[in-house]
Image (cartoon, coloured by chain):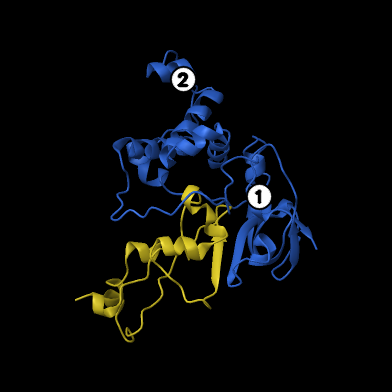
Chain colours: A yellow, B blue
């Protein structure tokens, strides 16, 4: 899920979300289903970053180290286990 | 209104410029604009839909040339003057010339925490819920001259109701100062081909949150 104010350079997000995501350096597999939630009322959404592989059995605190700002707004993936000390 | 703000699906704006380590504000005045907006919201001076409508009414070249917080500020100027809280002359002078119109309440330091909390948009229902998840619906082909939250790209399109969010205050009425006029609110999902034609990304689905008056049975 991508959380962006829609305007100007983000206006094509509802038509070409893969293109917008690639501007952020994210390339999704061709068969990944993409769902755009255009927030046109006052309902609000939260993003749960996808759990990276190799984190089975990790504690909440340890998993929190993988979470980045970008992964919370859908413009990036969380860190992989190898990217934290 | 069919203005330049309603740009969902438009091409030609170029790549998204990603800023690394983006700060909350790029200048001190941006933080002040956010604070003023929250203070006027808490004061009950106008509603969020009035802010949106005021932005939509900005001349197109101004709208397109303004940054996010500049648009907020320009909309605030419109609402302050149109609603009689200050005159254009006072804004220009930078100080009040007459005692201002009274506000229902004021955001003071002791209540600033509560003042920053989002208020609820839920309202008591006025009638039975017309649609349920799974129903096929068509969005209406409407072009009001006033504020609406049905984007142009999603008008006269067939989709499926996915969720019902209960009754919410209705922006189209609020922006016209016609009261909350609560309406049922649904998430409606569209297939990419319905919105963007045969060449659309087949893996894409798009949903909007649609108020019941935007929808009709298929």
**Residue at the spot 24% in from the left edge and 75% down from the top edge:** A83
Q: Is residue B201 left or right of residue B211?
A: left
Query: How far is the residue under mark 2 from the one under mark 1?
Result: 39 Å
Q: Which is in the foreground here, disc 2 or disc 1?
A: 1
Figure check: B187 above or below B71: below
The residue that disc 1 covers is B152
Q: Is residue A56 left or right of residue A8?
A: left
Image x and y of residue B211, in percent: 67, 53
Whether residue B11 is visible to the viewer of this picture, yes or no, is: yes
Whether residue A74 is visible to the viewer of this picture, yes or no, is: no
Which element type, helix, strand or loop, lies under badge 2? loop
- Kindly identify which numbered label has been placed on residue B100: 2
**Mark with earlier residue (2, 1):** 2
Residue furthest to the right: B218
Q: Name the image quarter holding residue B148.
A: top right
Residue furthest to the top: B97
Quarter of the picture containing the N terminus of chain B is top right
Chain letter belonging to callout 1: B
């Amino acid at each position: 899920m991508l959380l962006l104010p829609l305007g100007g350079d983000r206006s094509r997000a509802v038509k070409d979300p893969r293109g917008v995501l690639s501007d952020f350096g994210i390339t999704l597999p061709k068969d990944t289903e993409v769902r755009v939630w255009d927030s046109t009322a006052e309902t609000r959404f939260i993003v749960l970053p996808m759990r990276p592989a190799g984190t089975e059995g990790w504690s909440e605190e340890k998993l929190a180290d993988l979470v980045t700002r970008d992964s919370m707004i859908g413009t990036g993936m969380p860190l992989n286990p190898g990217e934290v000390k | 209104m069919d203005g330049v703000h309603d740009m969902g699906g438009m091409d030609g704006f170029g790549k998204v410029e990603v800023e690394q380590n983006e700060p909350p504000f790029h200048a001190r005045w941006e933080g002040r604009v956010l604070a003023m907006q929250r203070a006027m919201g808490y004061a009950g001076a106008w509603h969020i839909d009035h802010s949106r409508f005021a932005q939509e009414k900005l001349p197109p070249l101004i709208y397109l040339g303004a940054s996010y917080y500049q648009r907020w500020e320009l909309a605030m100027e419109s609402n302050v003057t149109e609603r009689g809280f200050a005159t254009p002359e006072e804004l220009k002078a930078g100080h009040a010339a007459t005692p201002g119109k009274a506000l229902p309440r004021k955001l003071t330091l002791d209540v600033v925490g509560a003042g920053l909390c989002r208020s609820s948009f839920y309202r008591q229902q006025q009638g039975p819920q017309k649609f349920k998840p799974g129903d096929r619906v068509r969005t209406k082909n409407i072009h009001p001259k006033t504020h609406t939250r049905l984007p142009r790209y999603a008008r006269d399109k067939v989709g499926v109701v996915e969720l019902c969010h209960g009754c919410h205050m209705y922006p189209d009425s609020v922006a016209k100062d016609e009261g909350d006029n609560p309406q049922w609110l649904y998430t409606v999902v569209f297939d990419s081909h319905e919105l963007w034609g045969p060449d659309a990304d087949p893996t894409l689905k798009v949903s909007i949150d649609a108020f019941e008056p935007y929808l009709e049975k298929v």
